[in-house]
Image (cartoon, rainbow, N blue to C red):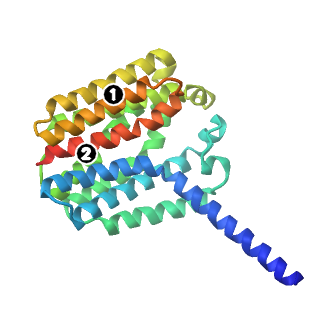
């Protein structure tokens, strides 16, 4: 009985360790933010083909996985900065070792390429995006004032990948609207992370303009981008979805009692709706 009890406790301990590891891996991939990128690619293909297909699902899955890869790589490279800033992420807190994270990132990158239905130009978009994701952290730490613009450009990659996979072209207004929304959201994040960035010796736009001013600018840019999306949509469905983006974003900003971090987190939902609205222009 004693041996059985010891074996049972050992099995439970192993199970708990595995569960903690899996949860840490999932948390590191930022699943909701990654899903926004995948949804954008998939929605463009669906709009181009006029139906849901295996190609659209595979394209969305490939971009989601690639975005997850980017978040994991980012956390590995930002380990020292995040640890000094007190960021509660699995790699920074030691729940997930850097070697485990690197192996996980490699598996994600391989999975993204194996899942991708696009060849030729689509594969080149994935390759350039992969390099851009790897280069983000070093460039952001060296040139922190430009990191918001860099992220805004990177976030256009899912839109480009979806258009290449679906065989359609999107206007520059679609890319500009998405980039401006992301740029505004990055400003909000800079204002919320100002204390941690200063501990790490990083001076962002929020450090120059101040938290409150940066927060206002970020919110205004996001709202104007959502309003522009309503204005440029021509189809009925596109306008309805774009209007839902604007209204949901306004709701996030006017909801009383929310912390800035919570508003930033909730803004992913209007961004997800907006991804669908932008994709409606791919017809």
| Residue lying at 47% horizontally and 31% vertically, measured from the top left | 263
Q: Nearer the viewer, residue 38 or 135?
A: 38
Residue under numbered circle 1? 222
Which residue does the image show at 23% across and 39% down from the upper left? 241
**Percent coordinates x, y for residue 228 in the rendering:** 21, 28
- Give x and y (percent) for residue 238: 17, 40
- State the image quarter where residue 109 is shown: bottom left
Q: Nearer the viewer, residue 24 or 52?
A: 52
For marks 2 and 1, give the CA distance.
Answer: 16 Å
**Neighbour class for label 1 at 10 Å: few (<14), some, many (≥20)?**
many
- Residue at point 13%, 39% (across, down): 236
Mark 1 element type: helix
Question: Residue 186 appears at what percent x and percent y?
Answer: 42, 31
Is residue 267 at all visible to an observer of this figure?
yes
Residue 276 is labelled as 2
Q: On the rendered structure, is 229 left or right of 143?
A: left
Q: Is residue 180 visible?
A: no
Q: Is 165 left, or right, of 247 in this rendering?
A: left
**78 w.r.t. 229: above or below:** below
């Amino acid at each position: 009985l004693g041996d059985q009890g010891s074996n049972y406790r050992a099995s439970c301990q192993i199970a708990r360790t595995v569960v903690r590891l899996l949860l840490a891996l999932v948390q590191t991939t930022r699943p909701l933010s990654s899903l926004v990128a995948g949804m954008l690619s998939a929605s463009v293909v669906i709009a181009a083909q006029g139906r849901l297909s295996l190609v659209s699902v595979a394209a969305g899955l490939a971009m989601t996985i690639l975005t997850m890869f980017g978040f994991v790589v980012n956390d590995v490279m930002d380990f020292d900065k995040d640890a000094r800033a007190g960021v509660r992420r699995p790699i920074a807190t030691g729940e997930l070792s850097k070697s485990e994270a690197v192996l996980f990132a490699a598996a994600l990158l391989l999975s993204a390429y194996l899942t991708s239905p696009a060849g030729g130009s689509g594969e080149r978009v994935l390759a350039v995006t992969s390099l851009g994701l790897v280069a983000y952290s070093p460039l952001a730490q060296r040139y922190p004032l430009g990191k918001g613009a860099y992220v805004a450009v990177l976030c256009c990659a899912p839109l480009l990948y979806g258009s290449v996979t679906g065989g359609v072209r999107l206007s520059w207004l679609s890319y500009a609207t998405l980039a401006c929304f992301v740029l505004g959201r990055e400003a909000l994040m800079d204002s919320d992370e100002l204390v941690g960035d200063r501990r790490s010796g990083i001076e962002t736009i929020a450090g120059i303009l101040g938290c409150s001013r940066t927060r206002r600018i970020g919110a205004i840019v996001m709202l104007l981008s959502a309003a522009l999306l309503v204005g440029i949509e021509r189809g009925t469905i596109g306008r309805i979805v774009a209007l839902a983006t604007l209204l949901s974003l306004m709701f996030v900003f006017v909801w009383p009692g929310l912390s800035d971090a919570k508003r930033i987190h909730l803004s992913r939902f209007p961004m997800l709706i907006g991804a669908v609205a932008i994709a409606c222009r791919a017809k």
